[in-house]
Amino acid sequence: MNRAICWIRRDLRLSDHRVLARACERHDEVVVVFVFDPSILKRWAPRNRRVSFILASLAELDGKLRQHGSKLVTLLGEPSVEIPELCSRLGASATYWGLDHDPFAIARDERVAAALATNGVRSEGISDQTIRVKGEVLTKGGTPFRVFTPYSRQWLELFGPVVDAAEACADLSKLVAVNIIESEGVELNHELLGFEAMDLWLEPGEEAGQAALAAFESRIDRYGETRDFPASSGVSFLSAHLRFGTVSIRSAVRAALRHDTAGAKKWLIELVWREFYQDILANFPEVVHTTYDPQYANLPWPGSHEHFESWCLGRTGFPIVDAAMRCFNETGWMHNRLRMIVASFLTKDLLVDYKKGEAYFAEGLLDFDLASNNGGWQWAASTGCDAQPYFRVFNPYLQSRKFDPDGEFIRRWVPELAGLSGEDVHNPSAFQVLECGYVDAIVDHDVQRQRAVAMFESCRLGG
């Protein structure tokens, strides 16, 4: 029997699944497998929401597979050992997986491919988590783009809605019968993996992802007007679903294409930003360890550890920053506008190395994606590709008044300020701080802005 393995990772769904569709197209029988890799798990703290999201999504996926007479095989161990051994036991001749631009994932996949080849098993990585992969969107000179606007133009020119956004339908009749694989894998839970079960701010799984996409599509036309206001429901809330593939990127693009409105077009551009950061990571993997712009590789970053700790705890004395950080610590999620505000504040007001903020987000974000997290932090720190110019520093007070004008988000997450009215909630006076028990501002924004600009200029001049 011509049998294959479909190894899922960041594609926890059955619908619009290119990898599964390819395996079912080429083979008579297909086994769906997920591997918990200890080398990844050991980097996560015991209270990690991503494990809860994955386990719940896998449970739903297993239920769907059982409806088709099969089941999900879950393994725990080094993939370069587990996958070849499973192929050997099941007599599988090929293994398929989705391409991943993370350098760690690339190295892992190369080890798995080499181990499979030793056993005579063919392997193939298939584009699934992005519309375009490395080498497809290039300048006229054949080089990767370094600026977003021309990249987005080329991406949109190359993009064919019918071909690239078409539904990838797998023939689920090809799934291996459960009796053949019932002894394979292990039944994993939080305790066995060494993690605590965590409450999530959104429902995990493919069904919830589709529901979230449908809900957003009902308000997508107003996305451009509402997306910057954290107290409203103006964003898609799909970042975690796109991260884990409980919603395919093609489904998201199709939703944008169904609406010929400014809001839908704006959201499509945000999806292209996601593609751009993936492209940067694929072509310039050194950004994981150093600045994209080499002239800032040795930027001094004189900020103190005490200020970094205050930022982490949401105790800086800047209400919008503190509200954002407390929300993040409580839920593992942060609104995109707030991500820009807190990143700018850490790097330009507190003068703390962006790598510390990037690492803090990487540890706590439910929707953590290496490419987007690194790209966003380097953008805010003015060290990245097509980044915010170093002399443009977000004023946290102005950002607060503009994007949380009534202070609704601030009051929700900084209850000490709930009694303040009007402008006071954005920048409470020293007397009000004393009265309500809130912390005083730990820095002077105007002074720190001047220090940040001088720091960058000195570095640019080789000082």
Image (cartoon, rainbow, N blue to C red):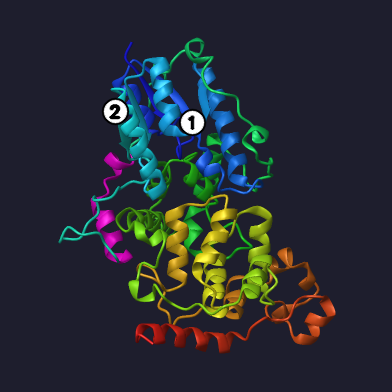
- Residue 167 sits above or below residue 423 on the image: above
- Residue 76 sits above or below residue 267 on the image: above
Picture coordinates of residue 56 (x, y %)?
60, 35
Locate residue 29: give its quadrant. Answer: top left
Q: Residue 394 carries which label?
A: none
The residue pinned by badge 2 equals 117
Describe residue 117's horizontal placement relative to residue 57 as left or right.
Answer: left
The residue pinned by badge 1 equals 34
Describe residue 430's horizontal placement relative to residue 253 as left or right.
Answer: right
Residue 306 magenta-highlighted: no
The residue at the point 63 percent across, 59 percent down is 328
Picture coordinates of residue 162 (x, y %)?
28, 40
Picture coordinates of residue 8 (x, y %)?
44, 33
Q: Nearer the viewer, mark 1 or mark 2?
A: 2
Picture coordinates of residue 419 (x, y %)?
81, 73
Inspect the image, locate mark 1, and give the three-letter code of the amino acid beneath it: Phe
